[in-house]
Image (cartoon, rainbow, N blue to C red):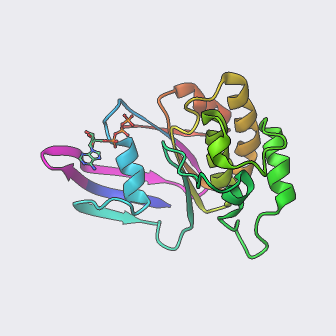
Amino acid sequence: MIKIDELNKSFGDTAVFKEFSAEFEDGSVTCIMGSSGIGKTTLLRILMGLEDYDDGRITGIENKTMAAVFQEDRLCENLTVSANIRMTGGKDEKGISEQEVVKYLEIIGMKDMAGKQVSELSGGMKRRVAILRAVLADRDIVFFDEPLKGLDQETEKKVMETIVPLLSGKTVLWVTHREDEAAYFKNANMLKL
Ligand SMILES: Nc1ncnc2c1ncn2[C@@H]1O[C@H](COP(=O)(O)OP(=O)(O)OP(=O)(O)O)[C@@H](O)[C@H]1O
């Protein structure tokens, strides 16, 4: 279990977290909501080790493997879609096969796109590549920061129907502004900041 105890975090005079505590069971999905600027991204960044915190205790995250979909795509623009997705190496030494990449791309509406350079893709395509990369990386914890932004409804549905089964057993922290996204998961917890 990931456990946050009495976390304090400020940026200058802005106190983002004051004695904040929360728990995330291993293998659970938690949708994190709250108004803009409340600290959702900061919380993910702290858990990922990308941001320091002032005080408090975080346990259960050491020795865990992680993947993330940030608000920005953070893809390597000059590499192909396939190279971007396969670069994580997957869970073990077998890696992620090209066939697997091609299969999932087709399901999420990106047939024949594996060999395309990322810089040539639309915004919504880049989003899908970033999501697929994080999910196929097959890590213990997967962080999503507003991952569906910019996808149309039909594409969103396809993506979610594809990734939810692949995320089974993983600890998922899913930041969103939309309460209805939780319904894509079987038993998502809600955390309102
Ligand atoms: N590097 C930084 N330096 C100074 N202030 C920061 C920094 N990062 C975040 N903040 C501040 O911390 C607060 C929380 O920001 P954060 O991005 O975590 O909010 P959020 O809930 O994710 O917002 P949104 O829904 O708009 O993405 C905001 O007041 C923001 O201005």
Looking at this rendering, what residue extends furthest in the left direction? 13
Judge by depth and name the residue closer to the eye, 26 or 32.
Answer: 32
Segment tinted magenta in the rendering: 8-30
Looking at this rendering, what residue extends furthest in the bottom direction? 93
Which image quadrant is residue 83 in?
Answer: bottom right
Q: Is residue 177 magenta?
A: no
Please say if 45 is above or below 126.
Answer: below
Judge by depth and name the residue closer to the eye, 179 or 153.
Answer: 153
Which image quadrant is residue 54 in?
Answer: bottom left
Q: Main secondary structure of the magenta part?
A: strand
Q: Is residue 17 magenta?
A: yes
Q: Quadrant of the C terminus?
A: top left
Residue 166: percent from left, percent from top: 73, 51
Report whether 80 appears left or right of 143: right
Residue 7: percent from left, percent from top: 28, 55
Residue 147: percent from left, percent from top: 56, 39
Report whether 96 appears left or right of 122: right
Judge by depth and name the residue closer to the eye, 159 or 24.
Answer: 159
Residue 177: percent from left, percent from top: 47, 29
Q: Residue at x 75, y 46 (%)?
A: 165
Q: Residue at x 60, y 35 (%)?
A: 123
